[in-house]
């Protein structure tokens, strides 16, 4: 007999961010669950931005695989066009070099036969449209916090802080770096703090961004400019916590001057058009992704350095691979079979650890000031720039078109259920 206020579902998703909401939509769009059989649990649900609101300070650079997954979820075509911007080039250079000369690397969509290198997307608009797509798919939104979780061979049951109980066949933790789901499942994490802060703001620059993402590597961390449709750029400036505090205390004019200097004057004078936000950086990864009838995705499973903008893309690929694995489950009662969930874990944990190690290695290499590291950086950038096959592979990796990619993301039409 059911307890008062209890409900039964096939899948319970904890977390209503982009990853959790996209996962819920994907389960229905891929016909893995019927409408009404997926629950999303969150302590609060996002609200839409005001019509005249500026771009969110959270912006995401989404690759092609992420674009196709969001199409499959019914999200992509719902995004306001003024909140999505395709960029065509990326210029990366070392502090000792120049944006287009020695010690630099340029990626151009024309060189790999793609219409663009990805899209810059407003974070708040993306989160809201993912939640709306989940609602349209029939997902049931439950506003409360997770208090307890119990997984058995037969099902999973979660108790909420308001006393309600929710049962299902599979529990998906998509509740971010401080995941309560992960804690309740007894899954530990490893990693380390970078002892860096990332500063985020939007700026106007004297020179046009030319539909290009710009990133200069400094000893204290990279400074990146992501192009916005109104001619501004969204910046992510990684530096030490003490320098971050100093920069945030500057007046807007002084901050703009410091930013232009950090960028090597690549885009000329910089003028702040928003406030400046900051957040600490860390590398964190779950030692396991699964328990019987439970699985972790997105930041609940892995947090990486933002220098290549791959965090959300990795999380969306988690969603795609989990859906791919569950497609072989058949009846709803088999969703939580540990054999199936371990298949997802093997596929995604190896890919995510590889990405985390690569980003961690790049951060260490480019933040090291010794002559040996400087020489290695120069050699690596020159080699990558002079070998078209290497550049193409790196660009395809960034787009999410290389590695273990589910078949339904490999073509533009593959999103159809």
Image (spheres, helix red, strand yellow):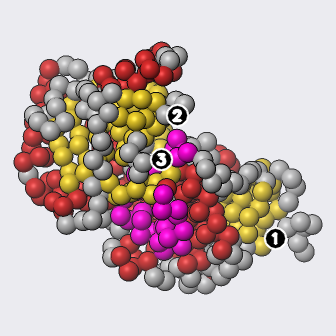
Labels 3 and 2: the sequence-earlier one: 3
What residue appears at the point 17 percent right and 43 percent down from the top-left corner? 105
What residue appears at the point 29 percent right and 60 percent down from the top-left corner? 116
Is residue 241 something one can see in this rendering? no
Q: Position of residue 260 (x, y in %)?
A: 33, 26
Q: Which residue is mark 1?
A: 7
Q: Quadrant of residue 78?
A: bottom right
What residue appears at the point 52 percent right and 63 percent down from the top-left corner? 79
Quadrant of the rendering where the N terminus is positioned: bottom right
**Front position in the image: 252 or 91:** 252
Label drawn at residue 274: 2
Q: Is residue 330 magenta?
A: no
Circle 3 crowding by C-alpha within 10 Å: few under 14, some 14–19, many from 20: many
Quote the CA–CA distance across marks 3 and 2.
Answer: 14 Å
Circle 1 crowding by C-alpha within 10 Å: few under 14, some 14–19, many from 20: some
Q: Of tags 1 and 2, which is closer to the observer?
A: 2
Which residues fall within the magenta stretch?
Answer: 54-82
Circle 2 crowding by C-alpha within 10 Å: few under 14, some 14–19, many from 20: some
Dot 3: element: strand
Above or below: residue 265 compared with residue 74: above
Quote the CA–CA distance across marks 1 and 2.
Answer: 44 Å
Q: Which residue is mark 3?
A: 59
Q: Quadrant of residue 34?
A: bottom right
**Front position in the image: 414 or 332:** 414
Q: Position of residue 400 (x, y in %)?
A: 33, 61
Does residue 331 appear left or right of residue 369 in this picture? right
Dot 1: element: strand
Above or below: residue 233 compared with residue 219: below
Labels 1 and 3: the sequence-earlier one: 1
Dot 2: element: loop
Labels 1 and 2: the sequence-earlier one: 1
Above or below: residue 222 compared with residue 18: above
């Amino acid at each position: 007999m059911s307890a008062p206020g209890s409900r039964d579902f096939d899948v319970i998703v904890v977390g209503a961010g982009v990853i959790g909401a996209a996962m819920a939509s994907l389960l229905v769009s891929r016909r893995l669950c019927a409408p009404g059989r997926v629950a999303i649990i969150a302590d609060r649900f996002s609200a839409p931005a005001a019509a005249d609101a500026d771009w969110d300070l959270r912006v995401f650079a989404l690759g092609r695989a992420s674009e196709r997954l969001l199409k499959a979820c019914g999200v992509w075509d719902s995004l306001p066009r003024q909140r999505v911007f395709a960029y065509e080039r990326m210029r990366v250079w070392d502090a000792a070099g120049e944006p287009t000369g020695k010690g630099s690397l340029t990626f151009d969509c024309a060189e790999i036969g793609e219409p663009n290198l990805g899209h810059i997307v407003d974070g708040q608009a993306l989160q809201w449209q993912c939640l709306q797509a989940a609602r349209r798919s029939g997902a049931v939104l439950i506003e409360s916090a997770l208090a307890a979780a119990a997984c058995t061979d037969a099902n999973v049951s979660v108790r909420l802080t308001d006393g309600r109980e929710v049962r299902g066949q599979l529990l998906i933790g998509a509740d971010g770096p401080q995941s309560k789901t992960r804690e309740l499942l007894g899954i530990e994490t490893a990693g380390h703090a970078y002892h860096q802060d990332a500063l985020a703001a939007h700026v106007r620059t004297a020179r046009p961004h030319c539909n290009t993402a710009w990133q200069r590597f400094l000893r204290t961390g990279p400074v990146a400019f992501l192009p916005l449709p109104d001619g501004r750029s969204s910046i992510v400036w990684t530096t030490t916590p003490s320098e971050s505090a100093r920069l945030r205390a500057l007046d807007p004019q002084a901050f703009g001057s410091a930013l232009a200097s950090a960028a090597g004057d690549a885009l000329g004078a910089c003028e702040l058009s928003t406030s400046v936000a900051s957040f600490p950086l860390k590398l964190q990864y779950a030692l396991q992704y699964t328990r019987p009838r439970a699985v972790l995705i997105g930041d609940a499973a892995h947090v990486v350095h933002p220098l290549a903008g791959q965090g959300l893309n990795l999380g969306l690929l988690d969603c795609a691979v989990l859906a791919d694995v569950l497609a072989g489950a058949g009846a709803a009662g088999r969703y939580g079979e540990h054999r199936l969930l371990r298949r997802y874990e093997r596929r995604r944990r190896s890919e995510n650890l590889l990405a985390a190690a690569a980003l961690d290695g790049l951060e260490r290499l480019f933040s090291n000031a010794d002559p040996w590291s400087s020489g290695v950086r120069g050699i690596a950038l020159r080699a990558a720039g002079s070998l078209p096959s290497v550049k193409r592979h790196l660009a395809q990796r960034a787009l999410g078109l290389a590695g273990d990619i589910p078949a339904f993301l490999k073509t533009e039409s593959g999103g159809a259920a």
